[in-house]
């Protein structure tokens, strides 16, 4: 991967660099920054139960907003 000077400096400083790879928007970060971040957040795929809970919560929010508008 070839980065310009500005992108290289950003990576050296631990900053993220936005890239487009064959039409796919991506973010490049240093491995140590990624590892520090991944320790703070659960990046595992959601279970079906978690997705269902989120869908139920979203439906409740939408329903409340619609009832408030009427």
Image (cartoon, rainbow, N blue to C red):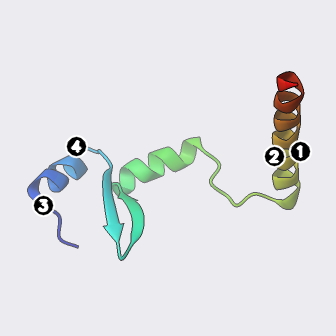
Q: Pinpoint residue 28: horizontal percent, then vertical percent.
A: 34, 58
**Left or right position of 48 against 35:** right
Q: Earlier in the sequence, mark 2 or mark 4?
A: 4
Residue holding disc 1: 56
* Marks 1 and 4, how far apart at CA: 41 Å
Badge 2 element: helix
Relative to 59, residue 32 above or below: below
Q: Do the residues labelled 1 and 3 touch (CB within 8 Å)?
A: no
- The residue that mark 3 highlights is 4
Q: Do the residues labelled 2 and 1 touch (CB within 8 Å)?
A: yes
Marks 2, 4: nearer the viewer: 2
Question: On the rendered image, what quadrant is the C terminus found in?
Answer: top right
Picture quadrant where residue 20 is located: bottom left
**Image spot of residue 10 (x, y percent):** 21, 47
Q: Residue 19 location in percent, x, y?
A: 31, 62
User: Which of the two residues, 28 or 38, is positioned nearer the viewer here?
Assistant: 28
């Amino acid at each position: 991967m070839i980065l310009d000077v500005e992108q290289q400096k950003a990576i050296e400083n631990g900053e993220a660099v936005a890239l487009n790879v064959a039409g796919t928007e991506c973010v490049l970060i240093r491995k140590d920054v990624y590892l520090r971040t991944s320790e703070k957040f659960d990046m595992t795929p959601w279970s079906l139960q978690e997705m269902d809970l989120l869908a139920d919560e979203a439906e409740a929010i939408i329903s409340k907003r619609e009832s408030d508008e009427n």
